[in-house]
Image: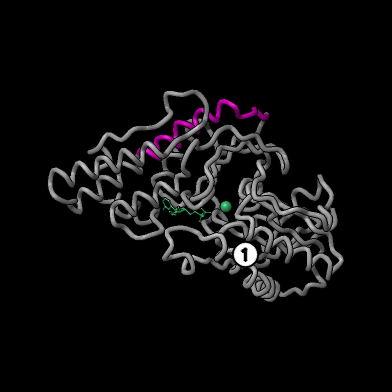
Amino acid sequence: AAPCTVLALESSCDDTAAAVLRRTAGGATEILSSVVRGQAELHAGFGGVVPEIAARAHAETLDHCVEQALEASGLGLDDIDAIAVTAGPGLIGGVVSGVMCAKGLAAATGKPLYGINHLAGHALTPGLTDAVPYPWLMLLVSGGHCQFLLVRGPEDFTRLGGTIDDAPGEAFDKIARLLGLPQPGGPAVEAAAKDGDPARFAFPRPLLDRAGCDMSFSGLKTAVLRTRDALIADQGGLTEQDRCDLCAGFQAAVADVFAEKTRRAMDNYPKVADQTPVICVAGGVAANITIRRALETVSQEFGARFIAPPLALCTDNAAMIGYAALEQMAISGPSGMSLPARPRWPL
Ligand code: KG4
Ligand code: ZN
């Protein structure tokens, strides 16, 4: 195949990102640059991402990200062969900003435009970081996502199940808030859990009694809240140890659910002769060591290789969007200038 250099944009949530990737004639993919600008400070006082603020920040920041990504890659716009952009799903204002910026770049350069599904970007990342062959099982877990995907090819995804209520990252953030810990909640809960006893409180493992890979975190969150309230009613407050035990119990429940549902997801894994099965995790929650260990253990049970991409490629970034474009352009043509921005876009 001819070598190809792609400039990719991502702006579907609260990170503005641009990246330059090169695919060599031999088929290897190199990340020449990857720039991510978070918006955490802008949303800090609001208890969540404010769509209008996010959209405005993306619109203001995209150009700078593109400039930085090009500069860091050592290339100019003339060297780019294709433009890739997240065209959904996500907060529509941000997606529109990205798609408009990408259309401008495509019009200016005369290069083809590829609209990429954000979830496909996450799901394909193991191919970028570890050059593994298809298929693989992906558990995508973050503040906004929670699903098991069987990835058989660049455009061949089967959703095996997902959360029926909150995403796990949301639950970590909520638990942290309930216990007076800082945001983002995931790292704070994990740190507190280190000194906690995961067995002190018997929190539920929701939906394990139900077949399939669907998950639920809302009831678990409520169970932690009730236990907290009971402790406060009994003792007039929470001790440091109570906080740590609550965090450890919650984290252990989440890890158990992921592990057991991964076992069930593996029932659907296609057998490929002479190929080691691959289990992957991505998304912000994949940073959690207890959760990684639980998934590693399950991978060993199935003789599978376990892959967790480096965190920078595991959370929202544009390199994964560029990689998805490089993978998909072998199968499908460019999107064209009528590419829509889609708030919802199931894989
Ligand atoms: O992928 P991400 O950066 O952003 C989106 O959700 O799009 O994920 C952020 C989420 C937050 O909810 C955060 O609390 C959670 O990932 N998170 C963690 C950890 N680090 C981040 N959850 C559990 N353990 C962690 N160490
Ligand atoms: Zn994402």
Where 267 falls versus 186 (above or below)?
Answer: above
> Residue 150, image x and y in percent?
62, 36
Tag 1's secondary structure?
A: strand
User: Which image quadrant: the C terminus?
Assistant: top right
Q: Residue at x 59, y 35 (%)?
A: 277
x then y, percent, for residue 259 = 44, 35
Q: Is residue 253 above or below residue 285?
A: above
- Identify residue for label 1: 17
Q: Which residues are magenta?
A: 253-272
Q: Residue at x 66, y 58 (%)?
A: 95
| Within-10-Å neighbours for mark 1: few <14, some 14–19, many 20+ | many
Q: Nearer the viewer, residue 286 or 214?
A: 214
Identified at 81% across, 70% down, the residue is 79
Q: Is mark 1 within 8 Å of ligand 2?
A: no
Amino acid carrying mark 1 in the image: Ala
Q: Position of residue 183 (x, y in %)?
A: 38, 59
Q: Is residue 125 above or below residue 165?
A: below
Judge whether residue 208 can be spotted in this image.
yes
Q: Nearest the camera: 304 or 239?
A: 239
Residue in the picture at 36% in, 38% down: 220
